[in-house]
Image (cartoon, rainbow, N blue to C red):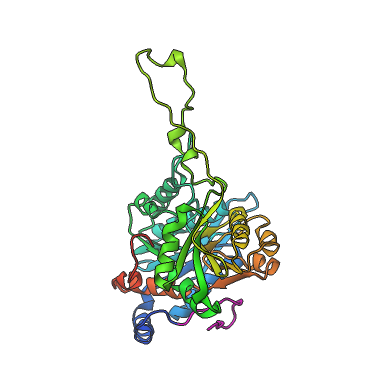
Amino acid sequence: MSTKLEGFSSVWVPREPLHESQEVVTRAQQDMNATKGGLVIFTANSNPSCMELGKRIAERLGVELGKVQVYQEANRETRVQIQESVRGKDVFIIQTVSKDVNTIIMELLIMVYACRTSCARSIIGVIPYFPYSKQCKMRKRGSIVSKLIASMMCKAGLTHMITMDLHQKEIQGFFNIPVDNLRASPFLLQYIQEEIPDYRNAVIVAKSPASAKRAQSFAERLRLGIAVIHGEAQDAESDLVDGRHSPPTVKNIGAIHPSLEIPLLIPKEKPPITVVGDVGGRIAIIVDDIIDDVASFLAAADTLKERGAYKIYVMATHGILSSDAPRLIEESAIDEVVVTNTIPHEIQKLQCPKIKTVDISMILSEAIRRIHNGESMSYLFRNIGLDD
């Protein structure tokens, strides 16, 4: 069932996924009416296209967005001016990622610090897509940038963070504040059940062994089969590019003691591309957490077509869709790409009608309400396993 919130662009808005939905909504309205005087919601983004999610959340909570000015000076410095009192209040700062990711980080840090110096009681960051989340491992002589971003946010004054489907769950350990890592899978599963005809004839596909756990989780919840593509081109998550291969494995006789013989690892050799599982005559649903560079998805779609899949869907939480991704998707064997609105992508949707959006403002607004009222968050994590 697809609906549309008045005044917003077209996205697929799921029906209430919570079994106790009526009770939750009624209680939410009562609680917010009783306590919204101590709640302020800001959007920290100077880009108007990135403010839509904040407006959706505020509408669901029945509150107005806080008054704030965020803009760039002529010399590209970011300036934030809060235009109402936040003293003694719970401040929720919603920040979505635009193309200029470094600017949005500075906007968030400056706004958090401004609220801190204005004596806000608590400052909660609502960051559906955590920037630099792919840089969460040491690679050769690089750095763990996710740890740096987390430290900066904590130092600026953030007291709590709400995010969604972190690229690696271990990123939560980079923070010394509470982090609620919400899941988009209930909304994507509901979309599959309601919007994909004959989904019972589908198979959930992992485009690489690294995403097999996520695919297994989807398959078990939908009672479907699973397929894994193995042997595709090496991606950035490979062990071949991490710090364990630095320094180089070339023997340097002058630097090694003559009595030491360090065994060298045999270099990896990828097998030809194979599909583990039957996809012939089936609907193939590729699942992942992020879709940015679409080359690996296109290669997976071509492989599945060769193996007999007659329809191919791609489902991901975060649709970054950089560069010419919309054009490549439009020209590919992929029939539909389904992402959530954690990241604004209205321009990409105009370029490629195959891209569909699922609204996740419902779970973010419920998380805000529960944190503000001091309620347990466990209700939002029901039936969530370690591998989800």
Residue at 49% from the left image edge and 66% from the top image edge: 204
Left or right: residue 62 versus residue 172 is right
- Magenta span includes 9: yes
x, y percentage for residue 358? 53, 73
Instruction: Left or right? Give the position of 263 relative to 376.
Output: right
Q: Is residue 26 left or right of residue 294?
A: left
Magenta stretch: give its range: 1-15
Which is nearer the eye, 99 or 296?
Answer: 296
Which residue is pictured at 47% across the width and 82% down the height? 15
Q: Please name the predominant secondary structure of the magenta segment in the image.
A: loop
Residue 63 in magenta stretch = no
In the rendered image, residue 95, in percent from the top left (x then y), is placed at 50, 62
Q: Quadrant of the C terminus?
A: bottom left
Numbered-mark total:
0
- Would you place residue 335 above or below residue 21 in this image? above
Which quarter of the figure has residue 349?
bottom right
Viewer-closest of 25 and 104: 25
Report which quarter residue 379 is drawn in. Answer: bottom left
Is residue 211 in sight in this rendering?
yes
Where does residue 87 sit, x and y in percent of width and height? 37, 66
With respect to residue 42, does 144 lie above or below?
above
Residue 138 screen position, x and y as percent: 44, 40
Say if residue 82 shows up in the picture: no
Q: Nearer the viewer, residue 126 or 249?
A: 249
